[in-house]
Amino acid sequence: MNYIAHSSPAWSKFLVTSTQVLGDLQFSARKTKAKKHTSKTAKKSKGEQKKIRQGSDFKSEFWNYCLIIFGSLLYAASINLLVIPAGLYIGNLTGIARIILELLQMVIPGIGSLTGVILLGLNLPLLLISYKAVNQKFMLKTIISIAVMTIAMSLIPIRPLIPELDDLLTVCLVGGTLAGFGAGLCLRAGGSSGGTDILGVYISLKHNNFSVGRVGLLISLIVYAYALFANPPLIMVYSVIFTLIYAFMMDRTHYQNVKINVMVITRSREILPFITQEIQRGATYWDGKGAYTDTDFVVINTVVSKYELIRLRRGVLDLDPKAFFIENNAVNVTGYFPSHFF
């Protein structure tokens, strides 16, 4: 048998086949079990990860709705207890609602405070813009904010919070800070306090040179014009100061002040000019390869604000639907990074 094996290599293969086959079968069986075990573990881990993500999303959304309710209450209280008793005008839709109420009081004497109701009527058409231009979550959170604000402004009496406080500059500082912080919380939670905020979010998504506060300042010119002709000039001056503080505080609170580090892995180099020209942000890129397919990719690293992240996602996915994103929230940036506020 050994002689045949040495003299005929072809026969030697057949003589050891049974041992090889048996060994292969044993190895194959062990490999199959390992695969089954691995797949079960993978399925289990995926299920656990899904539960963790769902729990985390629920907590995050619940916290966002709490912020919206608190921000709306803070805004309504600031308007009814500080701004209106001092005779100031806020340069947004609330100011326009107050103007409409004053004109109605000239026609219908004795009419009560309907600022919240008028504000609700003015906000209804803008909700359609929020649904079409932004997303459904933004519209739902904005509806909750407007509803809470309307109820609060109808129930909170219009009277000075501190009767001894008669310094208009102090009222501007305190009222503008509190009202801006409340409106900014609504924006930070993914909604808005309604009115010009909706237009501000919509325009800031379309044009990078505009922020929510800047849009509010432009629209407030109507309110200032009325305040100038219907009241002493001093009221108009302090109303402008109040609105400036309000707009600045709102922009400092909401997501335009939150920076996100984004890494995009893509095959399309067209994303580079999109980031630098459309988003107007700097970027660093390098060539990479996929570990499984050995395919060439471009790895792009950039830093954007929270609202710019929405535009970045949409633009990148339009250019490359298979692009891969890695996002790191709330990073600290040292160096030149335009805030795009005003």
Image: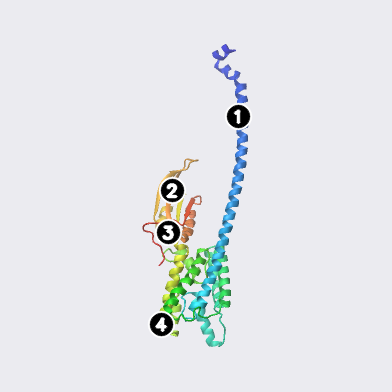
Q: Is residue 150 above or below residue 2?
A: below
Judging depth in this view, the residue of 329 and 322 nearest the camera is 329
Q: Earlier in the sequence, mark 4 or mark 1?
A: 1
Which disc is residue 27 wearing?
Answer: 1
- Residue at image x 42%, y 54%? 302
Residue drawn at 55 percent across, 17 percent down: 9
The residue identified by callout 3 is 279
| Marks 4 & 2, CB-CB < 8 Å contact | no
- Are the residues flagged by discs 2 and 3 in contact, CB closer than 8 Å? no
**How many neighbours does mark 1 have within 10 angstroms: few (below 14), some (14-19), or many (20 or more)?**
few
- Tell which circle, 2 or 3, labels the residue nearer the N-terminal end: 3
Residue 270 visible in rendering: no
- SS state under label 3: helix
Tell me the residue at 47%/70% (across/down): 180
The residue carrying mark 4 is 234
Residue 232: image quadrant is bottom left
The residue singled out by tag 2 in the image is 299
Label 4: state its secondary structure: helix
Which residue in the rendered view is the most extreme toward the left? 336
The three-letter amino acid code for the residue at tag 3 is Ile
Spatial separation of the CA atoms under disc 2 and disc 3: 17 Å
Nearer the observer, 316 or 238: 238
Check disc 2 and give the amino acid type: Val
